Image (cartoon, helix red, strand yellow):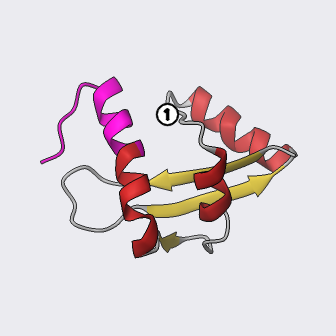
Amino acid sequence: MKLAVALKHELGKPDAPRVVASGRGSFAERIIEKAVENEIPIHKDDNLASLLSKVSVPSFIPEELFEAVARVLAFVYRINDKVPT
């Protein structure tokens, strides 16, 4: 069954990223559709999505996932030609 988790992080803000949506099946499909419609980058990582899906919405990501999420954010920054400040 498809799983999707949406994260939000504001460039330049000191706060940790937040899980803002999470779902399986048709809800996961809707999360992905919204990301595509809004030109939000999608990064596929089934293991990370599984771990993030256990975080309540909306909540900051747990410290144990900082490094993995930082890699995803670095990917997003690269494809958007942005450098974190």
User: Which of the 4 image quadrants contains residue 75?
Assistant: top left
Q: Is residue 7 above or below residue 40?
A: below
| Total marks in image | 1
Q: Magenta stretch?
A: 72-85
Q: Amino acid at mark 1?
A: Ile
The residue lying at 59 percent from left, 62 percent from top is 52
Residue 41 position, x and y percent, is 48, 32
Horizontal side of 56 relative to 65 (left or right) equals right
Q: Is residue 69 above or below residue 81?
A: below
User: Which of the 4 image quadrants contains residue 9?
Assistant: bottom left
Horizontal side of 27 relative to 16 (left or right) equals right
Q: Is residue 64 above or below residue 75?
A: below
The residue lying at 42 percent from left, 54 percent from top is 69
Horizontal side of 51 relative to 38 (left or right) equals right
The front one of 4 and 21 is 4
Residue 61 position, x and y percent, is 46, 69
Residue 37 position, x and y percent, is 60, 28
Residue 15 position, x and y percent, is 29, 68
Q: Is residue 2 above or below residue 59?
A: above
Q: Is residue 17 magenta?
A: no
The residue lying at 21 percent from left, 66 percent from top is 14
Horizontal side of 63 relative to 24 (left or right) equals left
Q: Residue furthest left?
A: 85
Residue located beneath label 1 in the image? 40
Please tell me how crowded label 1 is: few (under 14), some (14-19), or many (20+) other residues with Cα within 10 Å: some
The residue lying at 69 percent from left, 33 percent from top is 33
Determine whether the residue tagged by mark 1 lies in a helix, strand or loop. Answer: loop
